Image: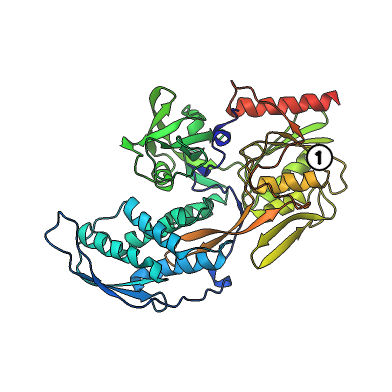
Amino acid sequence: MVLNTSMNHPRSIFVLLALSVVLSACTLFGTDSSETTIVGTEGPVTTVETIDGPADTEGPVDIEVDLGSCRGADEDFDLLCEAHEILTALYVDPLDDADLAAGASRGLREFEIDAATVDTGELTCSVPSDDFEGFCDLYATIQATEGGTDASLIDAAIRGMMDYGIDDRNSNYFDEQTYSEFNQDQGGQVQGIGALVNSANLEDEEELCTTMSATCKMEIVSPLPGSPAEASDIRAGDFIITVDGITTDGQTLDEVVSVVRGPAGSEVLLGIERGDELLEKLVVRDAVDIPVTSTEMLTDTVGLLQFYSFTSNSDELFRTSLQELLDQGMETLILDLQSNPGGSLDAAVNITSEFLDTGLVVTTQAPDQVLEYDVRGGGLDANGELEIYILINGGSASASEVLAGALQDNGRATLVGQNSFGKNTVQRLVPLSNGGGLKVTIARWVTPNGNDFGEIGIIPDIEIPYPDDLAGEDLRNFLRDEVLSLIEAS
């Protein structure tokens, strides 16, 4: 089945090259870490070891490693301890310290280290538990033989702990720049080329890949309408393989996004792989408005509302767009959620409430807490006068699924298209003391009828087969035309 690149890679992470991360899971915004009480861990028994350097160095590296506790941590390890404590306190499932330590060690091995002066002597390695002993040995060896600032090493360790220590691609570490960009993205405008991308694992589409290589590539999901990417003929399905002549291999998705972004008016030269072709595209960056809604009256009574993402203010923009269509005489609404990757859970609840008078929107389930989100009242179509068709596909994720699932369960909408993404997680954004942050899965959700679509996605009421020769906007318009034909025939 060919829909678009997000359908071909149903477990993708969505990212905008005009921004950082577009959530593929419901997120609670505006959360401060002070709201969470985090209990410090008891430290392991202190051990002292001498670390031998690699074979090509001149003898052993004379470093004594003091394995200490996160309680009263050495300041160099404060951030690692902070991230570990937040993660273990909030994560929806129990975590194994051995796995987290292995992930942190892998992060040290894989991520580029900033050069620094080699240091020898004593090292107090403050860690959550004795499972991190091997991590401390590796840390000391890398610091002494390869160089690396404490900050760069710890940053790599936290990234590895999040990427490889837990089996959850929706829990992520954001460094200071990425975290700032992420929060900026929620405001609706950023500067860059304006394209939705993901990391595509060409060997196994079900497996996450984070570091670019011959088998892990940055793939264009779609250029935004009116964006520099669209003006430069960058297309869905293109792979970005170089940026300003430098290969993306060895860089993480976030790192590539960071160098592609840039101030309006500046240029970036992108090497593009398109099938068997290798192309170069010189793109002039610009301020890009992240689209939230667009509307169109398709007939005198049928209105189309295209909804792109659940940003922090998307519920207000959605309500305004819905009112505009109602003012033009709309009796039937086609709500297009194709490739909408989700976002704010609060926005999803408010938008669902536009179409229901009372009842349940969604239930979140955490280990120690079950929360029910009810209809909030005052909806523009709470009396149920509109006939509603919702378009979904494999890129319709999370908050999109909350909205579609709630209206389907309540009998308020007919879902048309293909199974949705199937990601039923809720996440919390927690700032870190270095200006970065963690995005942590804290709960899972079910629809009002108790349905969990976390694996297969929400099943449409009317499944529409997709032609193999269409992609992008042509395919989106195909599904709209099919639904309009159904409406006119009824």
The three-letter code of the residue at mark 1 reads Leu
Pick out the residue farthest to the left: 58
Across and down, in percent, residue 424 comes to 64, 51
227 and 179: which one is in front? 179
Q: Is residue 111 visible?
A: no
Left or right, 187 with respect to 399, comes to left
Question: Where is 238 relative to 357, above or below?
Answer: above
Q: Which residue is the site of mark 1?
A: 326
Q: How is the image coloured?
A: rainbow
284 and 401: which one is in front? 401
* Dot 1 crowding, Cα within 10 Å, few <14, some 14–19, many 20+: some
Residue at 57 percent across and 61 percent down: it is 93
Across and down, in percent, residue 53 comes to 19, 60
Splitting the image into 4 quarters, where does residue 268 fall?
Answer: top left
Circle 1 SS class: helix
Left or right, 268 with respect to 8, comes to left
Residue at 84 percent across and 49 percent down: it is 382
Question: Where is 149 relative to 64, above or below?
Answer: above
Q: Is residue 396 visible?
A: yes
- The quadrant of the picture occupied by the C terminus is top right
335 and 321: which one is in front? 335
Across and down, in percent, residue 61 comes to 18, 65
For the image shown, how many numbered marks are present on the structure?
A: 1
311 and 80: which one is in front? 80
- The quadrant of the picture occupied by the N terminus is top right
Across and down, in percent, residue 472 comes to 58, 29
Splitting the image into 4 quarters, where does residue 73 fall?
Answer: bottom left
